[in-house]
């Protein structure tokens, strides 16, 4: 039976991948929405 | 640890076993006591008095008899379940026998008064002058340490036990049972329970979006991980450990090895958090108990470690508060941790779908089109249905019930809760056995661990505390009755 791959070997084989525009969008939208909701929902929680 | 696939998956098995325990407990309402044989462990100085059956109706069994009955019944039920999961029932039963007795021995040791007694009155009662003050939940910590010893110093033995090393199964059963217990708690203070649910939902939506995006950015840009590694890593570190890493790995079609490696790392760090954060909460959040509960769920990854840390935190904070003359009702800190964790689990499926949709439409355009909404259901953790059912049934039974019926519902859930404690101790022990620090270090965990350390200790723990504070700050559990 083949030896299971080691983490270091797997990571060593990883190809360099620059950040795509869609990933930048995903990060920005996720973070932005999270921060906006944080303010809104926390304010709502305080009001109710 | 690769396992065969069976006729049922772990989520459905946990749901059915949990509902089975719940149904047996409810027989008490019709005058039948079908769970009274379950063993309970008390804080002790005389070991002969440590164990007892949970119901006086079974007092003839004695403490050790109740322990034997509990072991025998759990072994039969779980071995049947393991067989349905595709495991070898005989091997499971053998391994489970060892796991059960070792885990229970740890619990008994942890309940020794010099470890567990936590107030001056308790110490006086037991005739001792000093205690570690770990509370009656200290047995969980001892079980975790016992498991760590087996996992790290006896790897051959740990490997022999592997069929019964199923912390996620044990904790999912415990969570289904916990639903009923929390239903009673909620029925007594419905407005507060509704508020806790709203706050839990709000806090996890926020935490998901903020934690995931920052962790993904750090993994991709600072550490140069590929998308295949960064997405499961971000979900594993920021959201809910093992389940999220596996769901995300599936959503973006990462190789299975990626999710497995990320999951191993998640478990290791969850153990560290479990040993540290409840004590930090005790030191700094005694006056904000529900902040502490939510913080455990947002910071400690994996269902097992998070709900378990909620249980320890509750015990430690209630002991501290009691020493100051404040007696909070039991169940609210653990309930907050469980509620937040359940919402996190529900959202794993939704978030995995969002990622699958983005990946299939924009990153690795898939043949046959984009991800379908039914993938949300496919990734939905089914044991949550059991939690919702037990919670809703008990809430319906308890709301508006006369005091005699309410007393019976409480007694029934008390009996079920005894088994929940036993599944917790199995969870703690088996998490420890799974956590082989040395093996992961030898495999070159360094770079993955570095992302974890930077994200978890750099911002997730602190942002989790801030979010918990913003939503749960000033919301206090009700005082204990009587």
Image (cartoon, rainbow, N blue to C red):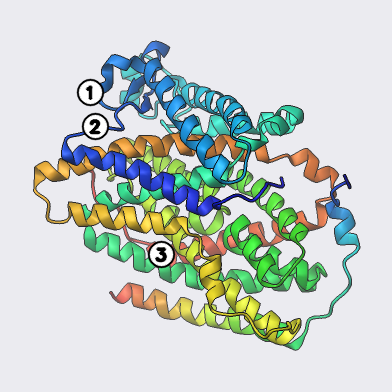
To which chain does the residue with label 2 belong?
B
In this rendering, position of residue B82 left or right of residue B120: right
User: Horizontal and vertical percent for residue B285?
Assistant: 43, 50
User: Disc 3 and disc 2: Cα gap in Å?
Assistant: 35 Å
- Tell me the mark number nearer the camera, choosing from 1 and 3: 1
Q: What residue is drawn where x is 22% and y is 42%?
A: B410
Which of the 4 image quadrants contains residue B191? bottom left
Does residue B358 appear anywhere in the picture? yes
Which of the 4 image quadrants contains residue B448? bottom right
Residue assigned mark 1: B57
Residue assigned mark 2: B33
Q: What residue is drawn where x is 87% and y is 44%?
A: A1
**Residue B135 against residue B404 in the figure, above or below:** above
Residue assigned mark 3: B200
User: Disc 1 and disc 2: Cα gap in Å?
Assistant: 8 Å
To which chain does the residue with label 3 belong?
B
To which chain does the residue with label 1 belong?
B
Q: Earlier in the sequence, mark 1 or mark 3?
A: 1
Q: What residue is drawn where x is 58% and y is 63%?
A: B239
Looking at the picture, tell me which residue is in the foreground, B370 or B433.
Answer: B370
């Amino acid at each position: 039976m083949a030896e299971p791959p080691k983490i270091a070997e797997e990571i060593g084989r990883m190809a360099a991948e620059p950040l795509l525009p869609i990933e930048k969008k995903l990060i920005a939208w996720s973070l932005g929405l999270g921060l906006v909701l944080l303010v809104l929902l926390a304010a709502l929680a305080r009001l109710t | 640890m690769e396992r065969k696939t069976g006729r049922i998956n772990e989520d459905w098995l946990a749901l059915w076993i949990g509902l089975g325990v719940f149904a047996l407990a409810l027989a008490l309402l019709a005058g039948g006591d079908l769970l009274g044989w379950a063993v309970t462990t008390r804080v002790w100085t005389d070991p002969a008095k440590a164990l007892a059956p949970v119901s006086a109706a079974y007092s003839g069994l004695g403490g050790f008899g109740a322990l034997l009955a509990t072991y025998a019944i759990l072994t039969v039920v779980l071995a049947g379940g393991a067989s349905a999961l595709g495991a070898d029932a005989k091997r499971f039963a053998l391994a489970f026998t060892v796991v059960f007795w070792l885990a229970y021995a740890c619990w008994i040791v942890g309940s020794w008064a010099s470890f567990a007694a936590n107030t001056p009155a308790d110490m006086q009662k037991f005739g001792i002058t000093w205690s570690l003050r770990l509370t009656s939940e200290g047995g969980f910590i001892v079980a975790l340490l016992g498991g760590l010893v087996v996992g790290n110093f006896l790897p051959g033995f740990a490997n022999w036990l592997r069929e019964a090393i199923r912390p996620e199964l044990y904790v999912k059963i415990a969570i289904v049972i916990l639903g009923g217990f929390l239903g009673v708690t909620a029925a007594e203070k419905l407005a507060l329970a509704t508020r806790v649910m709203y706050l839990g939902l709000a806090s996890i939506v926020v935490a998901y979006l903020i934690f995931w995006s920052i962790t993904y950015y750090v993994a991709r840009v600072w550490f140069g991980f590929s998308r295949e590694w960064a997405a499961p890593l971000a979900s594993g570190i920021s959201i809910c450990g093992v389940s999220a890493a596996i769901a995300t790995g599936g959503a973006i079609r990462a190789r299975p090895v990626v999710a497995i490696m990320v999951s191993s790392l998640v478990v290791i760090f969850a153990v560290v958090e479990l040993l540290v954060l409840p004590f930090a909460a005790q030191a700094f959040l005694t006056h904000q108990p529900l902040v502490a509960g939510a913080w455990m769920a947002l910071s400690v990854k994996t269902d097992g470690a998070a709900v378990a840390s909620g249980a320890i935190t509750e015990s430690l904070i209630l002991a501290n508060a009691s020493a100051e003359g404040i007696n909070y009702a039991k169940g609210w800190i653990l309930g907050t941790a469980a509620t937040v964790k359940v919402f996190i689990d529900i959202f794993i499926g939704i978030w995995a779908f969002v990622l699958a949709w983005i990946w299939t439409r924009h990153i690795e355009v898939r043949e046959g089109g984009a991800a379908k909404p039914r993938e949300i259901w496919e990734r939905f953790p089914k044991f949550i249905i059991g939690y919702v059912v037990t919670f809703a049934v008990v809430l319906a039974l308890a709301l508006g019930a006369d005091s005699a019926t309410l007393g019976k519902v409480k007694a029934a859930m008390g009996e079920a809760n005894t088994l929940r404690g036993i599944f917790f101790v199995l969870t703690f022990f088996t998490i420890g056995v799974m956590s082989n620090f040395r093996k992961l270090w030898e495999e070159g965990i360094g770079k993955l661990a570095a992302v974890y350390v930077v994200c978890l200790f750099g911002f997730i723990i602190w942002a989790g505390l801030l979010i918990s504070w913003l939503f749960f700050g000033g919301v206090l559990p009700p005082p204990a009755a009587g």
